[in-house]
Amino acid sequence: MSKNLALRLAVAIVGIPALIYISYTGGYFLFTFCIILISLGSYELVMMFKKKAYMTSWAFCLIMPVLCVVAAHFEYPVLYVLVLSLFISSLFVIKGRSIERFFDDLFSLLLPVFYLGVLSTFIIYLSVLPDNGGKLLVYVFLIVWATDTAAYFGGKTFGRKKLAPQLSPNKTLEGFFCGFIGAIIAGIFSQLVFLKIGWFKLFFMAVLACLFGQLGDLLESAIKRHCQVKDSSSIIPGHGGVLDRFDSFLFAVPVVYFIAIYL
């Protein structure tokens, strides 16, 4: 076993039970987790954007996403935070740089708000759903982990055709479809062990959470490729950055939330 793989396993052995406990418990434990996730993720985005000389403000890219989660936690309208973010970021750009770089700079300021702030609010929303809120959050983690694991080993074993070589050279089409098998297995396990919802709903959640999770992974790969970095950071030993580990999760949570309340 390589040193890097051993390190990844050690972090997983500690991290997975902790995340399951936080998800199931919810409340201020989960709220604190979201704040930490946003803080570290914002820092990683700002550091990557600085490599492209975009206008960045870590204070703005931290405060605005955090305000989104605070609003969600205390049941205030998140839309107010988004409007305020758009207004303040526009002032930053107009006063600070030439108009030719307006959209690049505006993008670099607003992406953390929507990518981290808005998506993280659905972690809060999902956790407080009646009956299955905390269980559904655990379910999303299991789906994402099973998808990543199946996609990785499936790609290593069967991978031939590249999925999106310009974004992520190592991802294969075969690994992409193996991810769906892992997600369905995780869904069946969840239904048999702790989550009692309809089989059709469960299957639908697994497939769409897997799809959007992998799309989220590709988006983060696109950001890294654009900024010419390998990992978003090295803050998690053996795993890279916070965005490297939670990109799929952030995109899968809203899908499960909307299916849970509308289907």
Image: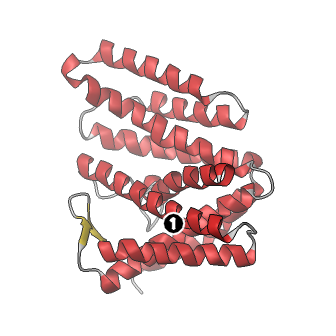
User: In front: 132, or 2?
Assistant: 132
Q: Is residue 35 visible?
A: no
Q: Quadrant of the C terminus?
A: bottom right
Task: Tell whether 107 sits left or right of 33.
Answer: left
Looking at the rendering, which quadrant does residue 76 occupy? top right
Q: Quadrant of the N terminus?
A: bottom left
Task: Tell whether 217 sits left or right of 10.
Answer: left
Looking at the rendering, which quadrant does residue 111 occupy? top left
Task: Tell whether 140 sits left or right of 147.
Answer: right
Q: Is residue 161 above or below residue 197?
A: below
**View extreme (right): residue:** 131
Residue 175 percent across, percent down from the top left: 36, 75
Residue 189 percent across, percent down from the top left: 65, 78
Residue 171 percent across, percent down from the top left: 30, 69
Task: Tell whether 105 sits left or right of 235.
Answer: left
Residue 63 percent across, percent down from the top left: 54, 30
Q: Is residue 179 visible?
A: yes
User: In front: 95, or 128?
Assistant: 128
Q: Residues within 10 Å of mark 1 (few under 14, many from 20)?
A: many
Residue in view at x 60 percent, y 62 percent: 140
Amino acid type of the residue that numbered disc 1 sits on in the rendered structure: Val
The residue where tag 1 is placed is 207
Colouring of the image: secondary structure
Residue in view at x 24 percent, y 80 percent: 160
Element at label 1: helix
